[in-house]
Image (spheres, coloured by chain):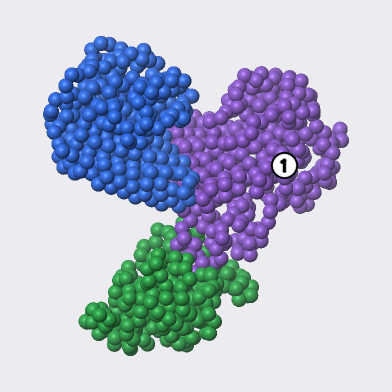
Chain colours: A purple, B blue, C green
Amino acid sequence: MSLKEFSDIANKEYEYGFKTDIKTELIEKGLNEDIVRKISAKNNEPDFILEFRLKAYKHWLTMEEPDWALLDYPEIDYQALHYYAAPEKPKEKLKSMDDVDPELKRTFEKLGIPLNEQKKLANVAVDAIFDSVSVATTYKEKLMKHGVIFCPFSEAVEKYPELIKKYMGSVVPHTDNYFAALNSAVFTEGSFVYIPKDTICPMELSTYFRINAEQTGQFERTLIICEENSYVSYLEGCTAPKFDTNQLHAAIVELVALDNAEIKYSTVQNWYAGDPKTGKGGIYNFVTKRGKCLGKKSKISWTQIETGSAITWKYPSCMLIGDDSIGEFFSVALTNHHQQADTGTKMVHIGKNTKSTIVSKGISVGKSVNTYRGKVQMNKSAKESENFTQCDSMLIGDECSANTFPYIDVRNASSNLGHEAATVKVSEEQLFYCQQRGISLEDALTTIVNGFCADVFKELPTEFAVEATQLLSLKLENTVG
Amino acid sequence: MLSKTTNPKTMELETLQKQARDAFNTLGFPTKRHENWLYWTPDNEQKALERKFYEPSDSIKENDVILIKNGSLRSKPNNNNLTVSNDTHDYQNENLSFNLDSSSLSYLNTSECSEVITIRCRGIINEPLQIRLESDHTKDNSTVNTKVNLIVEEHSSITATFYHQQLGGAFNLTNTSFELVCKDNANVNISHVFKDNKSKAFFHSIIHMHEKSNCNHISYVTNSLLTRHDTNVTFYKEEASLNLKGINLLTGEEQFYNHLTINHKSKNCFCKQHFKTILDDKSISEFSGLVYVAKGSHEVDSQQMNQILLFSDSARALSRPQLKIDADDVQCAHGSTIGQLNPEEIHYIKSRGLTESEAKALLTYGFAEEIIEEIQDSHLKEALAQDIKETVRKIKS
Amino acid sequence: MFEIKDLKASIEEKDILNGLSLTIKPGEIHAIMGPNGSGKSTLAKVISGHPDFEDPEGDIKLDGKDILDLEPDERANEGVFLAFQYPVDIPGVNNSEFLRMAYNAKQKYQNQPEIDPFDFESLIKEKLTVLNMKEAFLSRPVNHGFSGGEKKRNEILQMLMLDPRVVILDETDSGLDIDSLKQVSDAINHFKSENKMILIITHYQRLLNHIVPDTVHIMADGKITKSGDKSLALTLEDQGYDAFKDNQS
């Protein structure tokens, strides 16, 4: 990337902070059994989904919000939120993309996600989710020709109830944790991906999440199933308008990989992070992401670029059940101003000869707190398994914090594990060296930070690697001098 | 937490003990609530911990070694550079912490100890000093609470080895507290040996590092049923340097819980922590090491390494190195490895005519050697080397 | 013309440069020799604007323009290039992208358009040939995992690419084997031209067998104590620095 592009980006503010003025249909604030039933009714769901919701809701009532993460935020009033918000739409189903509300199309266009048939992104199929509903999914028909199902979750419930029954909650049960229980009770929309046997998904799949309405929560559910010998690369992006109040995002992502299947799941998270000066507003991001490597030689790879949100609580994990399965986690988490992130992963080795790799790069700037928290567990059954973990933290400025909290548990005598963590400093000498070559101080810093993250960026699909680099330089603006 | 206590130095022991008791009553025995990753809770030991055993002695003999038996001081050497006493006034001008906030058992120690033994080193002591902490009570289900402080004055130097030995029956616990003050420019070599303990041992060390002090601290745990060692280090002033090392050999159903907290409250200090553990049979080892660098404590250099050799599918290794950093100009790293001997190396040694078990013994000793080499007390060093060679030969797998 | 007049610099209240003066005319090569601690490397740092040396006194002028108050990147873009004694690692940053950034920074400074990536590629390949370096070199991270010799050659590659007016070679010969020393020297001789000004800082005279200086200066205690032609370097090699100590006493 050229210097000019760098500096252009560096001078922008949070450019996705606008709000779309559109008539929104809301279910009244608050959470109770009645609301859960209303959400279910809005979606015309079959009984088994409603039962699932109610079971989860009842369980949620018995649970307590977790407090072990190194996060400091005021108590969330779960009764003060709307659990369903949707742009008003005509009763009939949309026949083509042209029927989508032009205001919504414009919104996504502004976000760089054109939905029009003519303009849509080449080789990336997109499911655009606006508050609680899916606005449009591109390339659906083309994918269908390959047997690939890519559709909104609600549509999958209607069309493929057997798959949903079989897999929903099989990776993240509704009892898993407080936020997973909450999501299971009130989830609205999300994406569903099914890759049949022996199929390499012909294009990148992507879901773009947009929270628009104030005082709402977004509770989407994503489910990806890869049958034997199949492959998919999936990417999610997220943005939200600037509000003084906090919005809650509590999503669930479940991945299932059968024999020889591979799922590559990438996230570029850029939710509104709150006001840089006061820390007011921003998204509270409490997300449960987990993949099951059920089949032999299956592979699940998580890549995340976390730059947004006021609070991030997120541990994309792999259950390595199938023999010879592989789990990977590559993460860049950049926190600036008043942001707080407690993120990492969990690798549970169950099958024989399973392997996992963790690479985490945390960058703390401003007054932010950035924590890596990760667990690697090797069960007795996981003979001859391997893990390698590398967690590096970079601190820029004197008011931020960086923490590394790994949890390692090994229960067999044929596995190997190596964990390394270090603080990395942007040295005066590095900055001076760049400057002596004519590169300005701010560009030098961005370049060095990008270099620090290179091992993670190279895991992203090319189109998004550029976006990630840009995001980083944007977030680093005015941190030197 | 009992953070509001008044400074111990102005307080009578009785008051301190009452406060500690109150704190313990509030905190209770360690549970998951206090220690967010706890694998052992003293459920079965609670009664014994509440029942104290103390055996006072009428006189303190003169001897080469310092003997502290069943919580009381029995003998001390005659050395002009050393004062040893159980006079409660002896520690009162020192800023001791007395308790370790991270473990309620240390409050129990303060509350239940009957003597506070203070060893003070003033000057250079060349000959390694032996300190024996023995318990031989036979009355089942009771605990010996020993409290020892070692104060090394400015520009003073000492090498001391603490032998923690339970000579009594299997159901008698020891709950020991040790506070070490390394004053400005002090030079200190400390070893703690836990060997052949049939009962459970709880040990709290609190280490204070002052300006330009230098300390080498080695712990060795072997053939001991259950050892819990909580270490809390604070760096107050610049250019202090601490080497914390440990070598642990666990077989059978032995358990070792090693909890470290390093607080860097000053800039420009150095702290290296290196632990090696060998696990066989059904043994369990837990390591938890937190390095905290406070805001403004720049140029801190902290390197932590925890390495484990696992020889059995029934053994379990838990490792939790942690960094908490609030300053941007620091060099902090930690690492943890869990694994086996390198089969290539075993093969190489076998190809030179040694048997498989000899090869393994050799390599296992090699794994431990790096730590043993650091021991300053040459007698101890030899004894440990011998010990390890013998134990390693017994490792079956 | 590159002029240094009465340059004084200190670090932590310790004076390192004590009024150093030096003038290099276009086309000239000067060498500064001196024992450890004489202030040679400090001179290189002060010329390039290292932040360790706050407010040095004196003048540093390039073609009449005072550069002493400029930021390090501005000095670089004015045409001052320092080949570092210890080139710094920048992990994860691609060597050729780094060079392109530097190249374009200079273009921007001179209000020139950015170089076309393809033009850049052919330019850099041309320079690689001069140094007998492999293309694989370009895709590695800047100086990261480089051998001592590779680092030094990388410095010279950057010099050839950025085409500066003034070059300071800070102990470029240290850590080079004979073959590398020859290649590096050849590249510098190739670079040398009528309008370039080169300042070689070195400990030994062996580099000067390959790159022949017009003037040799001996430095001690932050000052130039003696200047002469290239034969001075040989005399120095023979008699040692003690013979040239400032006769202060």
Identified by mark 1, the residue type is: Asp
Q: Where is residue B119 drawn, in percent x and y?
A: 24, 33
Q: Where is residue B186 drawn, in percent x and y?
A: 26, 44
Nearer the observer, C129 or B310: B310
Nearer the observer, B91 or C143: B91
Left or right position of B250 against C4: left
Q: Chain of mark 1?
A: A
Determine whether B195 is above or below C191 in the image.
above
Residue drawn at (65%, 44%) of the image: A279
Which residue is labeled 1 in the image?
A244
Residue B144 in view here:
yes
The quarter of the displayed image where residue C180 is located: bottom left
Residue drawn at (33%, 44%) of the image: B210
Residue drawn at (27%, 81%) of the image: C248
Residue A129 in view here:
no
Q: Where is residue C215 drawn, in percent x and y?
A: 36, 86
